[in-house]
Image (spheres, grey):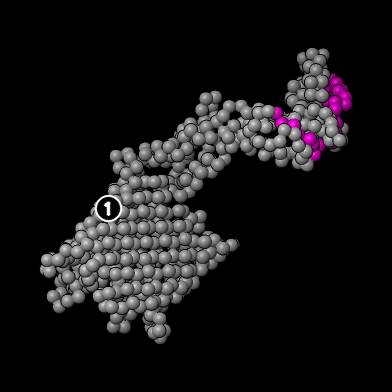
Amino acid sequence: MKSLLHIIFILLCVSLQAQKKQYFLIDTETKVRKKVKDSVTAAKFLDSLSQSNYFFTELKDVKIKGDSTEIFYDKGKNFNETFVQLSDSVKIQTKLKNEFFTKNLDSVKKQINRRYIDDGFAFSRIKSKYKGQKDGFPIVELDINKNNRRTIDGFVVKGYTRVPKRFIKNLEKDFKGKNYDDKNLVAINKNFQSHPFVTLERPPQTLFTKDSTQIYLFMEKKKTNTFDGVIGFGNDKTEKFTLNGTLNVNFKNMFNGFESLNLYWQRNPDKGQTFDLQADIPYLFKSNIGLNAKINIYRQDSTFANVRMQPALYYHINNRQKIGFRGTFETSTIIDSLYIQGKDYNKKGIGIWYDLTTPTEVDLFLYRTRIRVEFDYLTTAYTLENVNALQTQMYVFAEHNFHINGNHYFNLKGEGAMMSSKNEFSANELYRFGGWNSLRGFNENSLAADFYYYASAEYRYLVGNQAFFDVFGQYSQLNNKTLNVKPKLYSVGLGFNFFIPIGLMSFQLSNGNEFGNPFKFNDIKIHWGILSRF
């Protein structure tokens, strides 16, 4: 049938005069009239009907009226239920039976075509050929026109182009040479959704040439600088009302090297102050090695002061994961001679850490998943006693946001740390925790322990994409060998977070206590904060 149509139209083209320029295809069943460019286009259209399961298309009539030619055709029945025969190449690729019956030929075609597309043949096309009838159903042979296999040959950066060269090399390492298919295109797009410094203005675009396939990335620089300020209200150990706060400023990617500088200051109600300065330089010397340096200073009123420095080198596993080695150098000095629980000491040692962060699709949340694991091996010298002691320290943090359904989310978070030594710890070297970013309902850094953990469960209800309410509960246990206490603690509270023109504002009420103690309303902590990006 297909060959006959070609012959008819070739003769038709030869017989028509040069001035005949208008061609119309008319479906005798539906009376639909379609104008086409020329007779060749008309022939291609009629041929394509067989590829759409109209295997018995008939040319009914051709009428010539002046400058126009009307071609009448009847599609016949659409046969989606057929016997299928596969060519040898298709049979090998799909591992299907050589011949079978199907009630949905279109689905079979899509399934076969998808196999070839996933194998890199982006322009593959299934060909149908009518082979006769069997039991009242057509027999259709399916073959493939594969064209050339397409692989990703490289990336072309447009828009924000001042990105580290190593970043592009890592992208090429992950995707260059892989099949050009939907799976890899989605993976490329997701790679940018999770990136902290750049995003794509539009999905990846593709330029096909005869010999190459180039992926165009229209990148945009993210607003990554942040200012995070928190003001807290509560009572100190003497039940006196106090004001405390936290400032956290991050400068990121200011020099287009994905670098960052972090300044952190905190004051707690018990007159303790913390100052952190941290610098991070990824892709050192255009490699996947990064440099991180951190200085931490903690002063407890006029009692003691600790200074810790931690230089580190790390390796980018990918833009979500890092693993690193670090050194620790820490000094503590007792200021108040009457503070007998503390000791002057010097610490030094080495450690290893791992960090994973996955992005969130909800702008109100900082991330979807965060995991941080640290292990340090240290030597501690207590200077006045002339005693040296070996210590190990371990820290684990994990958080994940679960989407229940609709606007309902569930946040789970846990943190724990442990230090171990044959010698007794001094009070000024213990872990300090509690407050806004850990065990809420307690004053900032008011809890001291050589071992602690806490678990947090929080329900969040989103109001559109601009605000969410939360209700949370926390459980914690700590061990302080110096004071010989092992209290079990809890914290409960609720909050409201919402976007305003200058950033994300948070308001929270919380109350924490030890199990067995009476609930006190005057222990309620109030925190108000804002996170602004610029």
At horizontal 62% and vertical 37% (from top left) the residue drawn is 115
At horizontal 29% and vertical 48% (from top left) the residue drawn is 313
At which x and y percent is residue 116?
62, 34
Q: Which quadrant does the C terminus fall into?
A: bottom left
At which x and y percent is residue 87?
70, 28
For disc 1, the marked residue is 326
Residue 152 falls within the magenta-colored stretch: no
Q: Main secondary structure of the magenta part?
A: strand
At horizontal 37% and vertical 50% (from top left) the residue drawn is 322
The residue positioned farthest toward the bottom in the image shown:
518
Q: Amino acid at mark 1?
A: Arg
At which x and y percent is residue 506?
43, 67
Left or right position of 155 against 284:
right
The residue positioned farthest toward the front in the image shown:
422
Left or right position of 18 against 181:
right
Query: Element type at marker 1?
Result: strand
At horizontal 60% and vertical 35% (from top left) the residue drawn is 117
Q: Is residue 489 visible?
A: yes
Residue 63 falls within the magenta-colored stretch: yes
Q: Is residue 261 visible?
A: no
At which x and y percent is residue 260?
32, 51
Numbered range of the magenta stretch: 58-87
Quadrant of residue 24 in the image? top right
Q: Residues within 10 Å of mark 1 (few under 14, many from 20)?
A: many
Q: Nearer the viewer, residue 360 or 457?
A: 457
Left or right position of 267 against 223:
left
Quadrant of residue 231 in the image? bottom left
Depicted 175 relative to depicted 390: above or below: above
